[in-house]
Image (cartoon, helix red, strand yellow):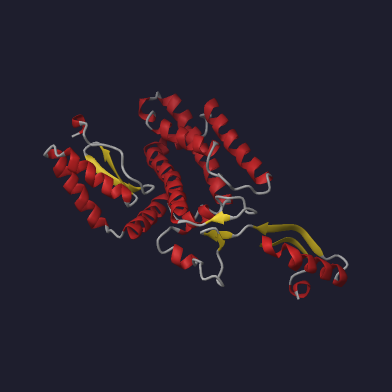
Amino acid sequence: MSAHYLSPRFDIHGGGADLKFPHHENEIAQTCAACEDGGVNYWLHNGHVTINNEKMAKSKKNFKTIREITESYHPLALRHFLMSAHYRSPLSFSASQLDSSSDALYYVYQTLQDLDDALLPYREAMAEDGGKAQQTAEAKDVINKLKSEFEAKMLDDLNTAHILTGAYQDALKFINASIGKLKKMQKKQRLSMLVSLVEIEKAAREVLDVLGLLTTLSYAEILKEMKQKTLTRAGLSEEDIEQKIEERIMARQKKEFEKSDQIRAELTVHGIALMDIGKETVWRPCFPSQANSSDGDKSTS
């Protein structure tokens, strides 16, 4: 049937590790007997998703559907989670692991959004420069390490475990550190840094694209969707968060720092981090945990 509708030879054949024997060995035997030039170039046997140390399976009634998971988590977070272990290895399912993937991806996209915002005032100057400015040596090193590390992981039997760590995180840190320096730089130095940041963004996007973690949506749209999923998991609305922020502001004004700390801690347990930027307080998703930070520093009130 496969030879009739597709071809007698397959480049890639996938399946669960439990199908390697006897199912796939039987396939090989049947194909050799039926087709002269039949067979498979690459067999990819994946490990199973487990839950409570048992294989997740419909027969065991211990499975989660994609639809169920993506009601509370962004589809990209689910994809990141599924790539968090080597495809041949078992993968333990838990809300904590999904929270980690969601937090990791939010940081990636928030960094790229911050870069997009930082580049906006300089787009015209970059166009006028006409590509004369060159990347900095440090930026070239960041890009080379990012690309070489990613290529090495792909050549290591498509090893996606810890794929957005190491050199990729170094690239994001370089972006965040450089954004704040742009305004203080001289024009020539700034143009060189702008070109560098654009090239680093391209390299970062290429990795996301290969992994299927890049969509047609803008950074802002993805971040908005991820924030909405966070609210869904927390059982809160945007209005609830705004109310908590107002309560915390009032508590800080009255120097009720213990109450202020409590509000922040309660939200952090639900995966919501409050961030004071100047006189404004905003929120972003975070890994759910007990907050250890304190508002007791009166200099910030």
Q: Nearer the viewer, residue 274 or 93?
A: 93
Residue name at image x 39 percent, y 41 percent: 114
Residue 136 visible, this orientation: no
Residue 211 visible, this orientation: yes
x%, y% of residue 299?
Answer: 20, 29
Determine whether, in the image, residue 249 is placed left or right of residue 122: left
Quarter holding residue 175:
top left
Q: Nearer the viewer, residue 193 or 35?
A: 35
Residue name at image x 23 percent, y 41 percent: 261
- In this picture, is 167 found above or below 107? above
Quarter holding residue 163:
top right
Q: Quadrant of the C terminus?
A: top left
x%, y% of residue 159?
Answer: 63, 47
Q: Nearer the viewer, residue 139 or 42?
A: 42
x%, y% of residue 148?
Answer: 63, 37
> How many marks overall?
0
